[in-house]
Every structure is written in C-alpha cells, then in structure tokens.
Amino acid sequence: RRLLVPVTAMTGAATRLASGDYSVRVGRVGVSELEGLARSFDAMVEGLETSERARRQMLRDVAHELRTPLTNLRAQIEAMQDGLR
C-alpha cells in the first residue's frame, strides 16, 4: 500500500497529461524511492507546458502575419474580377 498509492497517483497524473492537461503535478509522494520519479515527472510536465505555450503563441503569430498579405491578395483579385484593375 505504501508504494501503490503514489504509483496510482502518478498513473492518474500521466493519464491526465496524455489527455492534454498540462496543469497536473504529482508533488511529494512520501516514498523516498519514488521522490526522484515524481520530481522528474513534474519537471517533464513543466517543460511540456512551456513548449505547448510557445507553440500556441507561434501559431497565433503566424496566423496574424499571414492575414495581411492574404487580405491584400484577395482585394487585388476582386479588383481584377470587377474590372477595376
């Protein structure tokens, strides 16, 4: 039981992480043999959370940067279709 409870907690945390919940942390597990594993897990989750945040920001930036030239192209094409250009 002393080992089963922390292992079960880490399994649940891993399942939540796999479903995209980057806020999950294991924290202290109370069993010295598993403390290193729990710390490594929490560090891994923090790294994944940082990477996911950076990925989302990059996608927002790319989408924003593409909107202006695409809007300009659309306006030019519509002007050609309408015979204005």
Image (cartoon, rainbow, N blue to C red):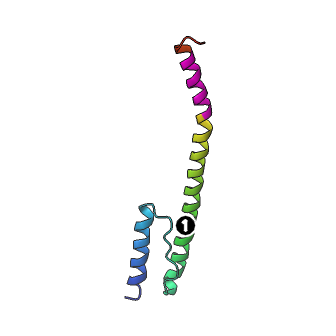
Residue lying farthest to the top in this orientation: 83
Q: In the image, what residue occupies the spot 57% across and 51% down?
A: 55
Q: In the image, what residue occupies the spot 59% across and 51% down?
A: 57
Question: Which residues are drawn in magenta?
Answer: 68-79
**Left or right: 61 in relation to 16:** right
Q: Position of residue 62 (x, y in %)?
A: 60, 41
- Quadrant (top left, top right, bottom left, bottom right) of the N terminus: bottom left
Residue 70 magenta-highlighted = yes
The relative height of residue 3 versus residue 12 in the rendered view (above or below) is: below
Q: Position of residue 85 (x, y in %)?
A: 60, 12
The relative height of residue 51 versus residue 40 in the rendered view (above or below) is: above
Q: How many marks?
A: 1
Q: In the image, what residue occupies the spot 43% across and 68% down?
A: 14
Q: Please name whichever residue, 56 or 82, is drawn nearer the observer in this view of the structure.
A: 82
* 10 Å crowding of disc 1: few (<14), some (14-19), many (20+): few
- Give the residue at mark 1: 44
Q: Position of residue 32 (x, y in %)?
A: 52, 86
The relative height of residue 65 versus residue 16 in the rendered view (above or below) is: above
Q: Secondary structure at mark 1?
A: helix
- Which secondary structure class fits the magenta region best? helix
Q: Please name whichever residue, 64 or 27, is drawn nearer the observer in this view of the structure.
A: 64
Res 61 → quadrant: top right
Q: Amino acid at mark 1?
A: Met
**Left or right: 25 in relation to 85:** left
Q: In the image, what residue occupies the spot 58% across and 35% down?
A: 67
The relative height of residue 16 versus residue 59 in the rendered view (above or below) is: below
